[in-house]
Image (tube, grey):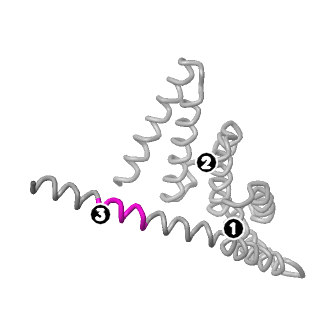
Amino acid sequence: FIGLSVFILQSVAAIEENDSLLNILDKTIKEHQLYEESKVQRINEYKMLLHGDISAYNQIHYNTLLIKEYESYSYDSAIHYINKNLQLISQDRIEEQNSLLLTFSTLLASTGRYHEAFDVLNEIKRADLTPKQLESFYSTEIKLNSELQFYNLNNEYARKYQIRKELYRVRLICHSTI
């Protein structure tokens, strides 16, 4: 009897928790329009700030804000502003270039453009990466190789990608423990 009572109480608590989560999800879905309007407003404000005679530094700053807004919203627009920043950033600002290239590669990977993502990663000299950037580099390599392993119909290639994925996973773990 006690076991049955505990089971019933746990079931009721689980149902209430699920209802609560569903209510939160429903509310978030209903507020989607507000989130989108807010994002569009921020994008328009940043674009307005880009008009006129502003320094390259400020252009890079506002383009970076636009990249962040567009990353999860409009792939083509994010790439447009990444390319603008790559043109604006001078060759001696390697850390900023690498950050942009890592963002670019991650964006390409998340949209299934794996070979282009590898090409972008290959432009980066690992020796020039900060510790945080190196972590991002390894994580992107893991993602790319994992995706290529999963979607590859050729077992030999799938195995190659699995080995590469594990290699970068070990590198990431070793890097994280330093």
Q: Position of residue 142 (x, y in %)?
A: 51, 41
Q: Quadrant of the C terminus?
A: bottom left
What secondary structure is marked by label 3?
helix
Residue that appears at 40% across and 40% down: 170
Looking at the rendered image, the quarter that the N terminus falls into is bottom left
Residue at horizontal 50 percent and vertical 23 percent from the top: 159
**Which residues are drawn in magenta?**
12-20
Mark 1 residue type: Glu
**Left or right of residue 20: residue 66:** right
Q: Residues within 10 Å of mark 3 (few under 14, many from 20)?
A: few
Image depth: mark 1 or mark 3 in front: 3
Residue denoted by label 2: 125
Q: Is residue 14 on the magenta stretch?
A: yes
- Mark 1 surroundings within 10 Å by alpha-carbon count, few (fewer than 14), some (14 through 19), many (20 or more): some
The residue closer to the viewer here, 156 or 90, is: 156
What residue would you read off at disc 3? 13
Q: Quadrant of residue 43?
A: bottom right
